Image: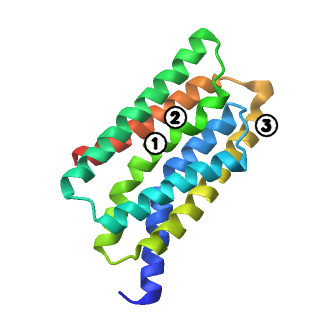
């Protein structure tokens, strides 16, 4: 594959694989939680490591179908946790990094395998996955926070319900990816 074409493929793949980072960042911002750079960096590093491993090892076709299913279940569980926190009034701000990094990384494994199949080098996949994850989650968080600030006096929806809805949507989208 031509050098620049490889970078274009890797960039587009990383952006497409980071839509869940944007959505999670948005829900974190919308629930008025902070998103420290260390947390965003940890999640981005997990996503990039998943892309690196998937691209390097060329995970088998069967595993590609399992990873989205596992990610779907994990996102559904996160949505359930959000609804539970609404009914109990509990805040779980500190549980964000370990609970979100795993399903997001699993969700990106299939993309890493696809990248390897089209000739993207593992180090290139790692770099673009890291950058796209950081930027997407930061942008989503900024938009979610801005939306809360601008609508806080006229809040119609509970932030937990919005966050749970986004996690359930990610779960359904990932499940669709697993069964198609």
- Element type at mark 2: helix
| Residue at 73%, 38% in the rendered image | 34
Could you say which quadrant of the image residue 91 lies in? Answer: top right
| Residue at 40%, 76% in the rendered image | 121
| Above or below, 52 relative to 163 | below
Q: Which mark is residue 102?
A: 1
Image location of residue 153, percent across then percent down: 80, 25
Q: Is residue 109 something one can see in this rendering?
A: yes
- Element type at mark 3: helix
Image location of residue 178, percent across then percent down: 27, 46
Image location of residue 130, percent across then percent down: 56, 62
Q: Which mark is residue 5?
A: none
Closer to us: 48 or 177? 48
Residue on which the image places disc 2: 99
- Element type at mark 1: helix
Residue on which the image places disc 3: 150
Marks 2,3: beta carbons within 8 A? no
């Amino acid at each position: 594959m031509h050098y620049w074409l490889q970078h274009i493929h890797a960039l587009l793949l990383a952006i497409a694989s980071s839509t869940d980072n944007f959505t999670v960042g948005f829900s974190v911002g919308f629930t008025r939680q902070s998103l420290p750079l260390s947390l965003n960096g940890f999640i981005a590093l997990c996503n990039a490591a998943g892309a690196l491993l998937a691209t390097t090892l060329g995970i088998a076709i069967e595993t590609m179908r399992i990873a989205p299913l596992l990610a779907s279940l994990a996102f559904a569980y996160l949505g359930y946790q959000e609804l539970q926190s609404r009914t109990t009034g509990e805040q779980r701000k500190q549980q964000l990094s370990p609970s979100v990094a795993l399903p997001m990384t699993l969700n990106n494994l299939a993309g890493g395998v696809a990248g390897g199949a089209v000739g993207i080098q593992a180090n290139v996949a790692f770099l673009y996955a890291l950058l796209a994850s950081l930027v997407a989650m930061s942008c989503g968080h900024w938009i979610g926070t801005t939306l809360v600030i601008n609508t806080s006096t006229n809040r119609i929806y509970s932030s937990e319900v919005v966050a749970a809805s986004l996690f359930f949507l990610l779960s359904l989208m990932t499940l669709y990816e697993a069964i198609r």
